Amino acid sequence: MAAKEKGKKAAPKPDLKWWREARFGMFIHWGLYAAAARHEWVKHRECITDADYQKYFDHFDPDLYDPKAWARAAKDAGMKYFVITTKHHEGFCLWDSKHTDYKATNTPCGKDLLKPMVKAFRNEGLRVGFYYSLIDWHHPEFPVDRIHPQRDDQAFREATKGRDVTKYAKYMRDQVKELLTQFGQVDQIFYDFSYPGEDGKGRDDWESEKLLALTRELMPKIIVDDRLDLNDVKGGWDFRTPEQFMAREWVTLNGKRVPWETCQTFSGSWGYYRDEETWKSVEQIVVMLADTVSKGGNLLLNVGPTARGTFDDRALARLEGMGRWMKLHGRAIYGCTQAPDEFPKPDNCILTYNKKAKRLYVHVLSWPIRELYLDGFAGKVEYAQLLNDASEVFMTEGTPHGQPDRETLTLELPVQRPDAALPVIELFLKS
Ligand code: GLC
């Protein structure tokens, strides 16, 4: 019996608990495309050949790379985990993989960039996530398809007809084995992405089930995203990943609420994009975070470091702004989720809820003059205060100014809006 037990594989036990508590993480997109500085899909967009893309490899030398500074910036912003692109669609690997030469150690940089990053973030107390691209526009056995940079090059297609996707699938498993055995505990893996159908790729190409089984075997507690094309398979994913749009409500599948994490960018690109101007403000990002948590989700906010290895000033300014807000308002985010249905969302507000603490957080999008009406809240609140300075907010049960009673609790707010990207009122609920 004991011997039998020994030989047994650990049963997968995806650990979503820390992740639900964390709510806020940092995505990092870093690769050779940082040098092109015009989107991580530049190779696809401009149909660049391997030979022409080589200049980025030959000149990749992030001399200012300081993973400790990155980790500190993430921590100070209030983030509790990070997810790094170990390999993006271009195929370039940040770590010293045995299975390819297309890696950081062979560029002028000459160093494994992943190891020190994992160490630095872990030292700051952040959990570790790896993004791994299923797509690979550099691998010699990756068949050309509808999104490949050489998709329109008929001669290239003809010449590479013999590419064997099973060899590529094996390469992915070999690499994932490295990633999940050489870097200590990895808490999340983000496979990206499937596009089945004509001239596309999906679970049969990636051998997704095998890849997933290996993942769970090597790292039983890891949580896996939903882009392996296994959405109809039991245990084929642990959380959904709506991207670049705001979910209107808690993400569901077959009518059931599911764990979800939305990933978002500061501007219109994941990789560093020098000339892109559509940067969101701190206020917009804070609202994104609160809104996501108010619907039971996580926010993974992306930074695209430069090819010198730095977060640029635009990113740093936003991270600092997030940190300023999180320092005073983190209580309205960590461990929080959607408010129970008995608390309807007041006008111009977002509600988050901490079940354990029995507190409700009213994020006020538009500061009203003097009174904030909370319909349906009467009789349920013990005490109210502004979250930024814990100053009391007077409450009146009932409806002033002759409106019909709607079980209203009226909060008496200061005329001056608290100086915060998004002011929050903390309500202690009666037990
Ligand atoms: C997409 C893109 C990509 C980015 C990712 C983030 O699938 O291909 O460039 O890495 O989303 O979720």
Image (cartoon, rainbow, N blue to C red):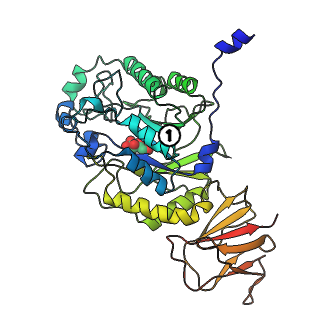
Q: Residue at x 53, y 49 (%)?
A: 80
Q: Report the quarter where the C terminus lies.
A: bottom right
* Left/right of residue 359 with respect to residue 313 in the rendered view: right
Left or right of 361 in this view: 159: left
Q: Which residue shows up at 50% across the image and 32% down it? A: 229
When asked about the image quadrant of residue 220, the answer is: top right
Residue 60 versus residue 131: which sits nearer the camera?
A: 60
Q: Is residue 183 above or below residue 322?
A: above
Mark yes or no: residue 72 visible. Answer: yes
Q: Which residue corresponds to mark 1?
A: 128
Q: Position of residue 377 (x, y in %)?
A: 75, 72
Q: How many marks?
A: 1
Residue 343 against residue 240 in the figure, above or below: below
Against 308, residue 397 (above or below) is below
Residue 193: image location, x then y, percent: 43, 36
Residue furthest out toward the bottom: 401
Above or below, comparing residue 251 to residue 152 in the picture: below
Q: Report if residue 264 is visible in the image.
A: no
Q: Is residue 220 left or right of residue 354?
A: left
Task: Report x, y in % for residue 156.
Answer: 21, 26
Q: How crowded is the residue under tag 1: few (<14 C-alpha within 10 Å), some, or many (20+)?
A: many
Q: Determine the image quadrant of residue 199.
A: top left
Answer with the quadrant where ligand 1 appears in the image: top left
Front residue of 97 and 51: 97
Residue occupying the point 70% across, 67% down: 344
Q: Confirm if mark 1 falls within 8 A of ligand 1.
A: no
Secondary structure of residue under mark 1: strand
Q: Judge left or right: residue 373 versus residue 267.
A: right
Seen at 28% across and 19% down, the residue is 161
Residue type (three-letter) at the residue carrying disc 1: Val
Q: Position of residue 361 (x, y in %)?
A: 65, 66
